[in-house]
Image: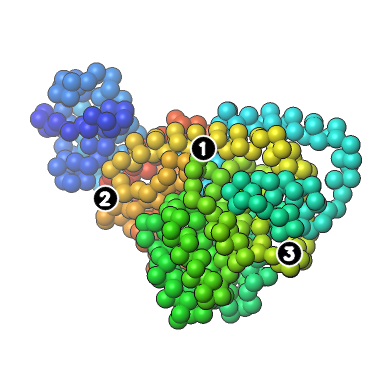
């Protein structure tokens, strides 16, 4: 028995019971607590740590649930052998699978989304000529919705001409249409080495050649982009400038300007996927704000309001490009939903979009704080207002083994393979928005952290 086991608990580590579990997992992983060793009695450990007995009891219950230890009435608690079946760890957490895979905004009560939806639709139904808006519309969107889009885009782009703005049924539809308008099969498209899977899928279907460009902590490396322009002659560049998916990097203003200069010098069009640009309270100006003549700027409501709206706005370099893109949109999706486009326009006019985005921003801050607390011993990159974080797997974990064990635990995550253009790093994206509340989020992240605190061989394979 290890009566002297006395873990080091960091003072600002959040709930002390989780800190005890993490210390236990780390000592097991490091070999300081070998399999089968008996832990000190809970009352003894509580006295050593100067905490309530209930805190230690809660920690031991969590350690048993996640498969770190076994307990037998009258005998005590023991470090679980790696060969022992991790029955508690295999059990899917209630109320089912925990989804960390879908990069969607949370739906905080402060956003009043249902209330706003009901009131907005009632307002539209009572508007003269509403039934006419429910008929077929122009593929670029009707003039009223394009004007609302120009107003909303103008908050970040500056003055935005209605003639250069289109309304579409979601950002993915726009990406497919833009690639069709810009690139022929075999043309080169520069992308970050880790890039959005939807773009990869659209490029593959188009037969476009993806050219990976190196990145660092600030995002796309301008020097690497210049080298690719000189050696590969790409036709376009795809970039997520703010809260990159998946790395969370945000390109600084100076770097955006350099990228635009290089693209202009080499005749390269820029596809700016600004899906997350409305989330930060302050962010560098989009590339389209100072290089609009070469930039196809895409802004969706899916990440700052709700993916259910399926509304995206596009600012194109010229009115000529508006005609080209409208033709591609018509071939792909005919038109955006007139109902959701009208609702989005109404929300823009009354300021609801900003209010919803602000509530989501605040909720994201709370969720990111929980993630920092629970995952503090792991290497993560994140932004306080973002929906997701980027997590490097600790040694000796490999992503294939981790993915299999995560599925056994009922955790859905996206491994780096989905984003990699070339070799994939040992990493994964963890999206925080789908969890229904903070407690469910904490539960799932604690499960993930506890799994990663053990060596892969300590987690039994389920047959």
Q: Residue at x 45, y 81 (%)?
A: 231
Residue 16 position by quadrant: top left
Tell me residue 93's x, y (percent). Answer: 45, 36
Which circle's residue, 3 or 2, is located before the other in the chain? 3
Which-is-in-front pick, marks 3 and 2?
3
**Label 3 Cα neighbours within 10 Å, binned few <14 / some 14-19 / many ≥20:** some
Which circle's residue, 3 or 1, is located before the other in the chain? 3
Instruction: Point out which mark residue 423 bears.
Output: none
Give me the C-alpha separation between circle 1 and circle 2. Answer: 36 Å
According to the image, label 3 marks what residue? 319
Q: Is residue 419 left or right of residue 69?
A: right
According to the image, label 2 marks what residue? 455
Task: Say above or below: 101 vs 418.
Answer: above
Q: Residue at x 57, y 51 (%)?
A: 275
Tell me residue 184's x, y (percent). Answer: 64, 77
Please name whichever residue, 423 or 52, is drawn nearer the observer in this view of the structure: 423
């Amino acid at each position: 028995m290890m009566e002297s086991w006395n873990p080091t608990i960091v003072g600002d580590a959040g709930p002390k019971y989780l800190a005890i579990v993490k210390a236990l997992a780390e000592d097991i992983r490091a070999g300081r607590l070998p399999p089968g060793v008996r832990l000190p009695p809970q009352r003894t450990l509580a006295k050593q740590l100067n905490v309530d007995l209930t805190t230690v009891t809660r920690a031991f219950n969590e350690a048993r649930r996640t498969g770190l230890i076994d307990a037998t009435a009258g005998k005590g608690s023991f470090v679980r052998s790696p060969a022992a079946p991790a029955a508690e760890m295999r059990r899917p957490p209630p109320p089912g699978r925990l989804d960390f895979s879908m990069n969607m905004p949370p739906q905080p009560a402060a956003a009043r989304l249902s209330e706003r939806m009901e009131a907005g639709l009632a307002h539209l139904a009572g508007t003269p000529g509403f039934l006419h808006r429910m008929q077929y519309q122009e593929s670029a969107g009707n003039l009223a919705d394009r004007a609302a889009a120009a107003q909303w885009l103008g908050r970040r782009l500056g003055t935005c001409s209605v003639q250069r703005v289109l309304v579409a049924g979601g950002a993915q539809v726009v990406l497919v249409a833009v690639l069709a308008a810009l690139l022929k099969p075999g043309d080169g498209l520069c992308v970050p080495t880790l890039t959005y899977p939807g773009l990869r899928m659209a490029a593959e279907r188009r037969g476009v050649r993806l050219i990976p460009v190196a990145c660092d902590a600030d995002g796309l490396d301008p020097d690497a982009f210049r080298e690719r322009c000189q050696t590969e002659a790409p036709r376009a560049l795809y970039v997520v400038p703010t809260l990159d998916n998946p790395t969370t990097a945000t390109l600084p203003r100076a770097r955006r300007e350099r990228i635009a200069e290089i693209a202009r010098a080499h005749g390269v069009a820029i596809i700016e996927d600004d899906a997350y640009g409305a989330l930060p309270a302050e962010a560098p100006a989009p590339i389209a704000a100072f290089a609009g003549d070469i930039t196809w700027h895409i802004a969706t409501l899916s990440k700052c309001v709700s993916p259910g709206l399926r509304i995206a706005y596009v600012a194109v370099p010229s009115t000529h490009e508006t005609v080209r893109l409208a033709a591609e949109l018509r071939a792909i999706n005919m038109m955006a939903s007139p109902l959701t486009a009208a609702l989005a326009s109404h929300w823009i006019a009354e300021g609801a979009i900003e209010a919803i985005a602000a509530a989501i921003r605040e909720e994201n801050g709370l969720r990111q704080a929980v993630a920092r607390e629970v995952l503090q011993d792991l290497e993560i990159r994140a932004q306080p207002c973002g929906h997701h974080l980027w997590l490097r797997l600790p040694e000796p974990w490999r992503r294939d083994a981790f993915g299999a064990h995560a599925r056994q635990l009922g955790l859905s995550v996206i491994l780096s393979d989905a984003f990699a253009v070339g070799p994939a790093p040992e990493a994964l994206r963890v999206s925080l928005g789908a969890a229904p509340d903070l407690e469910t989020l904490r539960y799932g992240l604690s499960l993930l952290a506890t799994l990663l605190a053990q060596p892969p061989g300590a987690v039994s394979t389920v047959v």
